[in-house]
Structure formats: C-alpha cells, structure tokens
Amino acid sequence: MAIWQYTFYIIEGRSLRDLSPNEIFVEDNLFNEEPYWIYSHKKRNLFFEIESILRKNVSWSDSIDLYGKEDSNCLEVFFDHENYITSASIRIDFIHSYESVLKQFIEFCISKDLIMIDEDLNVVLLNYEYIDNIIKRSNQRKVYYNLGS
C-alpha cells in the first residue's frame, strides 16, 4: 500500500450477519477476513464485472486478481487453487480524483451484498459522502499532506 492510499476490506454481507453480527474477527490485532469468505463459498468471478470500473491488470501473484493499478485505485481479490475467494480489498488513491470509481464500487457492493470495512475495523455505511469523509479524515491523508509542509 502506498502512503497516498486508503484501504477498505471487503467481505460478503451474509457471512458477517451469520458469523459475527456484533463484532468482526480480529487475530493478533489484525482483521481476519478469510473466515467470512470461506463461509460465503464465493468464487473469484464474483468480481469479474469490476473490470467495467477498474481495468484488470497483471498481478505479482497467480492467486490474486488485480483491478486497477497497485499504486493508484485498485481492487485485489485473493483466491485459492479452486478459485474461491479468500480475501478482497480496495485501495483508494486520495491524491487523484476517486469520486467516480468509489461511487461505482459502492453500487457494486450494494448489488452484490458486500460490506466494506475501514482501516479502524468499522463496518462502513455504503454511502459516498460517508466513505469520502473517512478518507479525508484518515491519518495517512493527514501525514501525506503534511509531508509537503
């Protein structure tokens, strides 16, 4: 992740509601999204239509689908040898315009019953203004813009 990116974890909504409706899985102070994806039993093709938002690119790993550019707005979908999703996250590049990408991604999440979780491990309301506010108030955005001062 670049200093100019904010990361949101993506999990399947039904998995969150069924497995841990009151709290999310944390292991060694890190978010563990794999149980949600294992439970959901969704394959990587769930995200194929993202290519209309972020162009698919070559990843450094054969088990990751990369949409967009690693150093800009991008979605990474990790999958196992049977193509079942094990992890997904979107990184938003806050030094360039991201409104269109984020709005389209939010609509995609709503249509697929996907949940976004912020870097503070809070479930995020799927609303552009709400998410934009999270990004604008983030520590890394403050640090990035203070570097030039």
Image (spheres, rainbow, N blue to C red):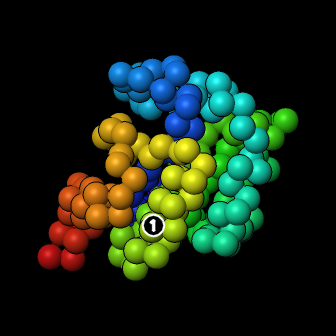
Q: Is residue 25 visible?
A: no
Q: Which residue is mark 1?
A: 102
Quarter of the image holding residue 79? top right
**Image position of 91 with respect to 81: above or below:** below
108 vs 46, left or right, is left
Kind of residue indicated by mark 1: Leu
Report crowding for label 1: few under 14, some 14 to 19, many 20 or more residues within 10 A (C-alpha).
many
Q: Nearer the viewer, residue 134 or 20?
A: 20
109 vs 148, left or right, is right
For the point 55% across and 31% down, the residue is 14
Quarter of the image holding residue 36? top right
Element class at badge 1: helix
84 vs 4, left or right, is right
12 vs 123, left or right, is right
Picture coordinates of residue 81, whole percent (x, y): 83, 36
For the point 23% across and 55% down, the residue is 139
